[in-house]
């Protein structure tokens, strides 16, 4: 479905805000879809035609973003659909949004037998911090990709041409295509960076598995003592142990996510991880006529 409309910055931002984790998380948790309902009613007049259902409305708005305003969510959703749900088994692979690495926040991390970071650079983004971000990511993960629009391809290829970092582009036909293959790189892995990216139960599991126990110290010294032990592990081996822990951050309703969720909500549902009951409430809402 193609939607043509005279776009403006206000409309673009307003439509993109609909597809936000926080927006849907609040709606699903309560459940309370009143705010979403108001936005959908607003865009019936803006788009010049009525929507058959709420599902149809969101599909139309997502299509509008694909054509007019390819925000970060569009890229995250493509990665979720094509790199996770369309390719891997959710029992052995996980995808994590907004993963803290050093002083950077990785847009998307894919973890299976290895680990891959996807750093999204939309047409509106600047590469100013990119060098620092890539350095951080390579300290914790073995493959790194920049993902951008095809019109920005040459710009970013020049920046990573002599590095292990790969480049993927969103094509004119809305497909993700590899412009440069990422090379596996373990030489930059750093124990401290990997360790600090983990939650307490995760790094505790690693220490317990490797050493047979965790430090018996007061809580205020626990992190420091665990990190001291972690530094005794080979970085490549610690990376594997880290991957095992990150794969456990799986969605609770894997079958629903992989087979029943509309394309435009894949990344949102992966992020907020609704219960079975919440999914049913969401589907009931989407299928209602407007």
Image (cartoon, rainbow, N blue to C red):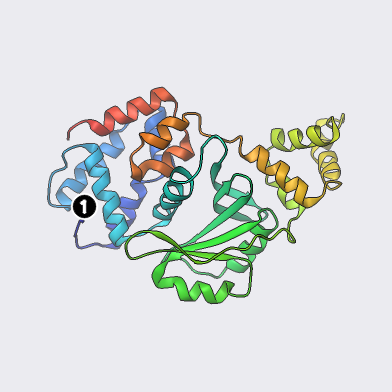
Q: Image point 42% across, 47% down: which residue?
A: 81
Query: Considering depth in this image, is 121 or 150 the residue closer to the camera?
Result: 150
Q: Around disc 1, counting alpha carbons within 10 Å, would you say few (fewer than 14), some (14 to 19), or many (20 or more)?
A: few
Q: Nearer the viewer, residue 266 or 50?
A: 266
Q: Nearer the viewer, residue 23 or 282?
A: 282
Q: Residue at x 77, y 47 (%)?
A: 237
- Horizontally, residue 71 falls left or right of residue 89, namely left
Q: Position of residue 226 (x, y in %)?
A: 82, 39
Q: Residue furthest left?
A: 49
Q: Which residue is mark 1?
A: 1
Is 4 left or right of 242, judged from the image as shown?
left
**Figure quadrant of residue 286:** top left
Left or right of 192? Residue 181 is: left
> In the image, 202: left or right of 214?
left
Q: Residue at x 41, y 49 (%)?
A: 77
Q: How many marks?
A: 1
Q: Is residue 66 above or below residue 194?
A: below
């Amino acid at each position: 479905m193609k939607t043509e409309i005279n776009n403006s910055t206000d409309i673009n931002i307003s439509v993109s805000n609909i597809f936000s984790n926080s927006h849907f998380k609040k709606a699903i948790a309560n459940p309370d879809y009143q705010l979403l309902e108001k936005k959908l009613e607003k865009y019936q007049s803006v788009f010049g035609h009525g929507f058959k259902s709420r599902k149809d409305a969101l599909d139309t708005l997502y299509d509008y973003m694909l054509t007019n305003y390819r925000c970060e969510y569009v890229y995250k959703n493509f990665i979720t659909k094509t790199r996770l749900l369309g390719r891997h088994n959710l029992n052995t692979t996980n995808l994590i949004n907004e993963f803290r690495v050093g002083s950077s926040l990785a847009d998307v991390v894919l973890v299976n037998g290895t680990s891959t970071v996807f750093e999204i650079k939309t047409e509106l983004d600047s590469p100013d911090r990119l060098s620092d971000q890539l350095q951080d990511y390579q300290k914790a993960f073995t493959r790194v990709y920049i993902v951008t629009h095809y019109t920005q391809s040459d710009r970013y290829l020049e920046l990573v041409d002599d590095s292990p970092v790969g480049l993927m582009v969103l094509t004119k036909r809305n497909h993700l295509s590899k412009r440069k293959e990422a090379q596996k790189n373990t030489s930059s892995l750093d124990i401290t960076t990997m360790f600090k990216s983990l939650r307490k139960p995760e790094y505790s599991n690693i220490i317990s598995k490797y050493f047979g126990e965790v430090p018996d110290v007061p809580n205020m010294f626990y992190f420091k003592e665990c990190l001291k032990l972690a530094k005794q592990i080979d970085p490549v081996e610690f990376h594997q142990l880290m991957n095992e822990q990150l794969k456990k951050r799986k969605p609770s309703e894997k079958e629903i996510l992989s087979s029943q969720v509309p394309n435009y909500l894949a990344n949102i549902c992966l992020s907020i991880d609704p219960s079975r009951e919440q999914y049913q409430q969401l589907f009931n809402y989407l299928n209602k006529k407007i």
